[in-house]
C-alpha cells in the first residue's frame, strides 16, 4: 500500500474489497474468482509502483477495453498519488521545489501575483511536456490544482475545480512551442511533424486527465470516496440509457448493438440444429434393424424442414423515444440476413413501411434520417397515437402478420391520452407466431400519466429495455 493512502477497515484486504465492489457497482462484471486473482496480484507486484499495480489489477478484473476508462477513474480514487517525496540530489538547495517535493518553476514560485504565478507554471508545464515524464507531469498536476484550482470554500471544506487550472494554464495554446521543441528547429511538414503533433496532443490530454484525477482525489478526501465514485464515473456504453444518450455515446453504442444480431443468429441456428428430429422413417429403421436380428436399436427419422422465421417490427419514431428507436432499428437492419423476411414499420400518429430504407449495406444513420423526411408517419399533429397507428397498420397491411411471423413492437406506450387500440393489437398478437414489446421506460413508470404500457402488457409480453445491456439480455432469451 503506498504510504499516506487511506485504507478500508480491515487493512489492505478490506481496501481491495472496497475497490472491487466499486468496480462491480460501476457495471464491470467481477466474479469471485477475479476478486481472488486481484488479491494474488497484491502479493506479486511492487505496491509502491502505482502503474505496476494499476496494470496488474486491470489484467485480472477487466475483460473488455471499453471497461478501462471506468477502472482508471476508480483506481485513482482508491490508490491516489501519494505525498511520497521525489528523491533529490545532495547539492539541490532545500526549498527548490514545492511542499510535496515536486520541482518548482526554476526556483520559488511567485507569491501574491496570480499572473506571474500562472506564467511560471506555464513555463514549467511546457518543460515537463517536452520531457514527457508522466510521473513528473502527474505531480505537477497536484501542484497546479493546489495553486490554481481552489474555489470558494464549501460547507464541507475547500472546493477545487479542474476548469480553473486548465483555463489559467491553457495547455492547448502550448502546441506550437511543443512542436518547435520536439522538432529542434528542423523543417516542418512531413511524417516527423505529424508524429510530433500527435505526441503533443497525447501529452496534453494526459495532463488534463491528471488534473481531473487530482481534483477528484481532493474532493473524495472531503466528501467521501464512494460519493465521488458514483458521480465521477461515466456509465459504460452498455449501461447508457437510450433516451439520455449523448453524442459522445452514440459511436460506442453502435458498436455494442451491432453484435447482438449475430448472437441471436447463433442461438436460432443452434435451436434449429438441436431441435427434435422429424417424423420416423419406418422403411430405413426396419432395414437398419436387420443388422441386429430385427431389433430396431437405432431409429431413423426424416429430415425436419427448417424455416427461417419472419419478423415484423413496429417502431415508434416520435421525438420522445428517438434515441431508443435509433438503436432498435440498427438491430432490425442487422437481423435482415438471419430472417427469411424482415419488414420494418415506423409510426408516430400514422404508420408507414420503411423496409425500403434498410437495404443491405445501407447506412443506418442515413436510413433513420430518411424516415424522418420521406416516410408517411404523421397524419395529424405529430404526437404519438398508438391506437390510430395500429389500425392503419392492420388496414393497409392485413397479411403482414401471420402464423410464421414474429412481431416486435418498440415504444414507450405513451398515447397522449388517445385510445390505445387494444383490440387491434390483441388481434395482431393472436395471429402472430410470437410477439414481444420492448419499452425504453423504467417499469415503475408504466401506467403513469398518459402511459398505457400496463394495459398493453396484458396483451403482449412487455420487456423493459433502457440500455444495450438489457437489449442484449432480451436478445439472448428471444
Image: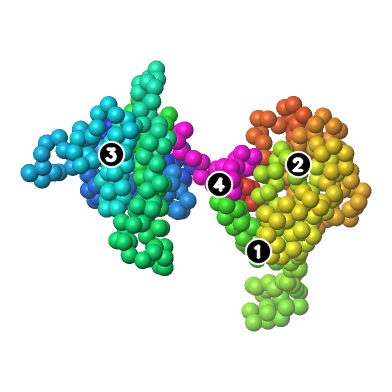
Q: Which of marks 2 and 3 is nearer the N terminus?
A: 3
Between tags 4 and 1, which lies in front?
Answer: 4
Residues packed near mark 2 inside 10 Å, few (<14), some (14 to 19) or many (20 plus): many
Residue 172, x across and y down, in percent: 41, 47
Residue beneath the point at 24% across and 50% down: 45
Left of 254 or right of it: where is 128? Answer: left
- Disc 4, SS: helix
Residue beneath the point at 75% across and 45% down: 317
Which labelled disc corresponds to residue 318? Answer: 2
472 shown above or below 182: above
Residue position marked by numbered label 1 in the rendering: 269
Q: Which of marks 2 and 4 is nearer the N terminus?
A: 4
In space, the residues marked 2 and 1 are separated at their CA atoms by 34 Å
Q: Does residue 276 appear anywhere in the picture?
A: no
In space, the residues marked 2 and 4 are separated at their CA atoms by 22 Å
Q: What stretch is highlighted in magenta?
A: 230-250
In space, the residues marked 1 and 3 are separated at their CA atoms by 66 Å
Left of 311 or right of it: where is 88? Answer: left
- Disc 2, SS: loop
- Disc 3, SS: helix
Residue nearest the viewer, comparing 225 with 170: 170
Residue position marked by numbered label 3 in the rendering: 120
Amino acid at each position: 500500500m503506498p504510504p499516506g493512502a487511506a485504507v478500508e477497515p480491515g487493512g489492505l484486504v478490506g481496501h481491495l474489497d472496497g475497490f472491487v465492489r466499486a468496480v462491480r457497482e460501476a457495471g464491470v462484471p467481477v466474479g469471485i474468482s477475479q476478486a481472488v486473482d486481484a488479491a494474488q496480484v497484491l502479493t506479486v507486484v511492487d505496491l509502491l509502483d502505482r502503474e505496476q499495480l494499476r496494470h496488474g489489477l486491470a489484467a485480472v478484473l477487466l475483460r473488455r477495453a471499453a471497461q478501462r476508462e471506468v477502472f482508471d477513474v476508480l483506481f485513482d480514487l482508491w490508490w491516489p498519488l501519494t505525498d511520497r517525496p521525489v528523491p533529490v540530489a545532495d547539492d539541490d538547495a532545500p526549498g527548490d521545489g514545492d511542499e510535496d517535493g515536486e520541482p518548482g518553476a526554476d526556483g520559488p514560485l511567485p507569491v501574491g501575483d496570480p499572473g506571474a504565478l500562472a506564467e511560471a507554471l506555464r513555463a514549467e508545464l511546457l518543460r515537463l511536456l517536452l520531457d514527457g515524464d508522466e510521473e513528473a507531469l502527474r505531480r505537477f498536476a497536484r501542484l497546479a490544482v493546489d495553486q490554481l484550482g481552489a474555489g470558494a470554500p464549501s460547507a464541507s471544506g475547500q472546493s477545487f475545480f479542474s476548469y480553473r487550472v486548465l483555463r489559467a494554464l491553457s495547455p492547448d495554446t502550448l502546441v506550437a512551442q511543443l512542436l518547435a521543441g520536439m522538432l529542434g528547429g528542423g523543417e516542418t511538414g512531413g511524417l516527423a511533424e505529424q508524429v510530433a503533433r500527435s505526441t503533443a496532443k497525447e501529452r496534453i490530454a494526459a495532463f488534463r486527465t491528471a488534473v481531473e484525477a487530482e481534483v477528484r482525489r481532493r474532493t473524495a478526501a472531503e466528501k467521501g470516496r464512494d460519493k465521488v465514485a458514483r458521480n465521477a464515473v461515466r456509465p459504460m456504453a452498455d449501461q447508457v440509457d437510450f433516451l439520455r444518450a449523448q453524442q459522445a455515446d452514440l459511436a460506442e453504442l453502435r458498436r455494442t448493438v451491432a453484435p447482438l444480431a449475430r448472437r441471436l443468429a447463433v442461438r436460432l441456428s443452434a435451436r434449429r440444429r438441436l431441435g427434435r428430429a422429424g417424423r420416423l422413417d419406418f422403411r430405413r429403421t426396419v432395414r437398419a434393424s436387420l443388422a441386429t436380428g430385427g431389433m430396431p436399436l437405432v431409429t431413423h427419422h426424416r429430415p425436419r424442414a427448417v424455416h427461417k422465421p419472419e419478423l415484423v417490427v413496429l417502431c415508434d419514431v416520435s421525438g420522445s423515444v428517438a434515441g431508443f428507436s435509433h438503436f432498435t432499428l440498427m438491430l432490425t437492419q442487422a437481423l435482415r440476413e438471419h430472417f427469411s423476411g424482415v419488414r420494418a414499420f415506423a409510426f408516430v400518429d400514422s404508420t408507414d413501411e420503411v423496409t425500403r430504407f434498410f437495404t443491405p449495406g445501407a447506412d443506418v444513420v442515413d436510413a433513420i434520417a430518411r424516415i424522418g423526411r420521406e416516410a408517411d408517419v404523421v397524419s395529424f399533429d405529430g404526437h404519438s397515437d398508438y391506437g390510430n397507428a395500429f389500425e392503419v397498420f392492420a388496414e393497409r397491411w392485413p397479411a403482414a402478420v401471420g402464423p410464421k411471423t414474429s412481431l416486435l413492437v418498440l415504444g414507450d406506450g405513451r398515447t397522449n391520452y388517445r385510445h390505445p387500440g387494444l383490440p387491434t393489437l390483441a388481434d395482431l398478437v393472436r395471429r402472430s407466431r410470437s410477439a414481444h414489446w420492448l419499452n425504453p421506460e423504467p417499469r415503475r413508470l408504466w401506467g403513469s400519466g398518459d402511459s398505457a404500457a400496463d394495459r398493453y402488457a396484458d396483451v403482449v409480453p412487455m420487456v423493459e429495455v433502457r440500455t444495450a445491456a438489457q437489449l442484449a439480455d432480451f436478445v439472448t432469451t428471444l
